Structure formats: structure tokens, C-alpha cells
Amino acid sequence: MSHLLARLHRGLILFNGSLAGLAMVLIFLLVAGNAFARYTYGGSITWGEDTAIYLMIYGLMFGMSWAYLQDKHIGFDLIRRLLPPRWVRWQAVAVDLMVLVIGIGLILSAVEFIAARGGRTSSSTGMPMWLFQASMLIGGGLLSLSALVMAGLRLSTQQGEETSA
């Protein structure tokens, strides 16, 4: 079981990191191309600015999950430092469960948001807005999955081991 979790952990890190990186590269190319077009041809890509914003939101969602899987997110160590060493793992598991609840909340919010406004069409891209709003749904799902994997890894390791894979 822990071998499967470790493989899933590594796969999710690769998946999320790759897509977050791809989003950053596409944003750079889009913004640079738009600036180049504006100063050389006198006009810019109509859908460029909005698409860069949507790519940034998708990149943020993938990056959020990537950071959580590596414990590279912002954390509050004050409580952790005050706890006895045998409780630290359980505090981390409790945080994982809270993050799971937050991820599920993000999924539910996304479903309501898409149901209320997903039928609209973007004026700049001509694409349905649910394609862009789905980033919240995907982000919530990835965050929830990441929290489950991290909790599983923490519970499957021995007391003195680290959860880095």
C-alpha cells in the first residue's frame, strides 16, 4: 500500500509540476507575443489578455497541489513546535484532513459557479466560460487527492521516518 502511495505521490508531483510549468510557459509566450504584436504591428491579439488570466488560474491550481504534495506550502509551525514529537505526525494528518475538506468545498463552490454562470460565452475568446471555470473544479479535486495521498503517506510511515518520496 505505501509503495502504491509513493508512486501515486511521485506521479502527482510530476503531473502537477508539469502542467503548472506549461501554464507559465504559455503565459510568457502569450504575453510576450501580445507585446511584440502591439509594438510592431500596432495591434494585439484580442483574446490574449483574457487567455493569460485563465492560464494563470489553471497554473495556480496545479501549482497549489504541487506545493502541497511536497510540503512546500505556507505553514504555521508554532503549534507544531509546541507539540511533543509523537503528536507531530497526527497534527500533520489533521491538517491533511482539513485541506481535504477545503478541497471538497472548492469542488462544491465550482459546481455551483459553473451551474450559475457556465452557460455564458467569453466575449474575447468566444469559448464557453465553463472551460475556464472548471479550473476551480480541477483544482479542488487535485487538492483533495493530494491531501488524501499525503495523509496516507503520513499514516503509513513509521514514527521517525520522513514522508518525502
Image (tube, rainbow, N blue to C red):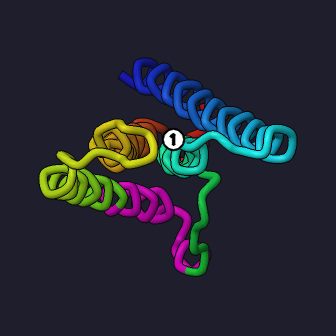
From the image, tell me which residue sits under label 1: 62
Measuring from the top left, give residue 46's x and y in whole percent: 57, 43
> Start and end of the magenta stretch?
79-98
Instruction: Answer left or right for 44 relative to 121.
Output: right
For the N terminus, which image quadrant?
Answer: top left
Q: Residue furthest right?
A: 40
Residue at screen point 68% across, 37% down: 30
**Who's the residue at 31% across and 42% down the image?**
134
What residue sits 36% from the left and 58% below the top? 99
**Is 89 one of the magenta-colored residues?**
yes
Q: Is residue 70 visible?
A: no
| Nearer to the camera, 98 or 33 | 33
Q: Residue furthest front?
A: 42
Name the residue: 38% across, 48% down: 123
Up-down relation of residue 131 to residue 7 (above or below): below
- On the image, the x and y values in percent for residue 39 come to 85, 46
Neighbour tally class for label 1: few under 14, some 14-19, many 20 plus, Cα within 10 Å: many
Locate residue 127, reporting x and y percent.
35, 36
**SS at badge 1:** helix
**Residue 136 visible, this angle:** yes
108 in the magenta segment: no
Front-most of residues 151 and 133? 133
Q: Position of residue 126 (x, y in %)?
A: 37, 38
- Judge whether 18 appears above or below 60 on screen: above
- The quarter of the picture where residue 129 lies is top left
The kind of residue on which mark 1 rests is Phe
Identify the main secondary structure in magenta. Answer: helix
